[in-house]
Image (tube, rainbow, N blue to C red):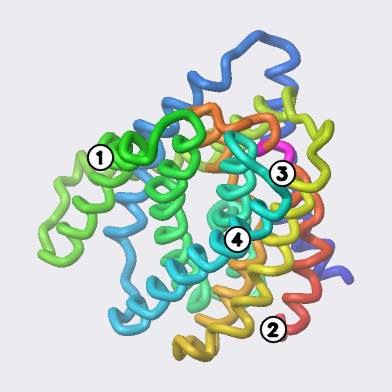
Amino acid sequence: MNELFTLFLNNLLPIFLIAGAGLILARATNLNPRSLSQIIFYIFSPCLIFTLITQSKLESGMMGRVVLYTVFACLLIGCITWIIGKLLKLEGALFSGVLITSMFMNSGNYGLPVVLFAFGPIALGYASLFFVINVGLTYTLGTVIASMSTMSLPKALLNLFKLPMLYAMLLAILFSYTGWKIPLPIERATKLLGEASIPSMLVLLGLQLKTASLIGRIKPVTLASSMRLVVSPLLAILLLPLFGLVGPARQAIIIEAGMPAAVLTTMLATEFNSEPSFVTAVVFITTLLSPLTLTPLLAFLGA
């Protein structure tokens, strides 16, 4: 019990404290969340992705399997959510909000500390790779889904080529595989800007909490929360052996799969007007409930 309480204090409470600061700021001022969202979207996050990819040092064969599973699981969750959403007759911006909160998890500022605390630095390496791929999918596939509620599919796909995160990923992969050395001023600048992304996302979450609303949305909230906290980790437990992922890699990915909805989704919802109040509510609720599902997962994995 003491270890679980320490887990809460060290990894979950800081999230609430930073988001709480954003909420207080939102109530005390008329600050527009979109301004912070755009700074994160166009500056902080691309630098974070570039830094994480260029500093990754995992074995290439295992990296390939982690990447393959991460993409497959994301698409599978999306397909299941889409089918259930259609049965519930969800549509438009609300349906986009349900999809992005179901598919993309908070694998960074929440998932990475939990994995490190429970399973150590080796598992953390696999969790970091999972995080990078999840972020990449959020900014690419997530952008398409979020923007489809306000524009046609061709225009939504065209948005991919406007994403600075896409070019940051490509540039980072180029540096990683060629062995080119990053100039020290650029390396330090991107690292500092990237480190600003996670706390900024949490402040953005707090700013959005002011407008969070669940009125008339119990079914979509339940769907998104169930997919994120229950279905996703269960699928990971069942599917990981098929991808040859065992040991620390298995532990890391199952925990990451059980993380609450990504704070990044609030930024996407704000940027593309995909029901940001609903998305923020799902992020907050799944974060609040996550200790109830992560605790048995940690026990199952032998933490």
Tell which tag, 1 or 4, sits nearer the viewer. Answer: 1
The amino acid type of the residue labelled 4 equals Gly
Is the Cβ of the residue at disc 2 closer than 8 Å to that at disc 3? no
The amino acid type of the residue labelled 1 equals Phe
> Is 229 placed above or below 145 here?
below
Is the Cβ of the residue at disc 1 closer than 8 Å to that at disc 3? no
The amino acid type of the residue labelled 2 equals Leu
Q: Which residue in the protein does label 1 denote?
A: 161
Q: Which residue in the protein does label 3 denote?
A: 282
- What's the distance in space between the residues labelled 2 and 4, CA to CA? 15 Å
> Is 70 placed above or below 12 here?
below
Of mark 4 and mark 3, the one earlier in the sequence is: 4
Q: Position of residue 79 (x, y in %)?
A: 55, 62
Q: Position of residue 228 (x, y in %)?
A: 67, 59
Is the Cβ of the residue at disc 1 closer than 8 Å to that at disc 4? no
Please state the extent of the stretch shown in magenta in the rendering: 279-283
The amino acid type of the residue labelled 3 equals Val
- What's the distance in space between the residues labelled 4 and 3, CA to CA? 17 Å
Q: Which residue in the protein does label 4 denote?
A: 111
Q: Position of residue 258 (x, y in %)?
A: 66, 66
Of mark 1 and mark 3, the one earlier in the sequence is: 1
Tell which tag, 2 or 3, sits nearer the viewer. Answer: 3
| Residue 34, visible in the rendered structure | yes
In terms of secondary structure, where does tag 4 sit? helix
In terms of secondary structure, where does tag 3 sit? helix
| Residue 164, visible in the rendered structure | no
Determine which quarter of the picture holds residue 292: bottom right
Question: From this viewpoint, which residue is outermost toward the top?
Answer: 30
Instruction: Identify the residue at horizontal 32%, vertical 42% (top origin).
Output: 157
Tell which tag, 4 or 3, sits nearer the viewer. Answer: 3
Of mark 2 and mark 3, the one earlier in the sequence is: 3
- What's the distance in space between the residues labelled 1 and 4, CA to CA? 29 Å
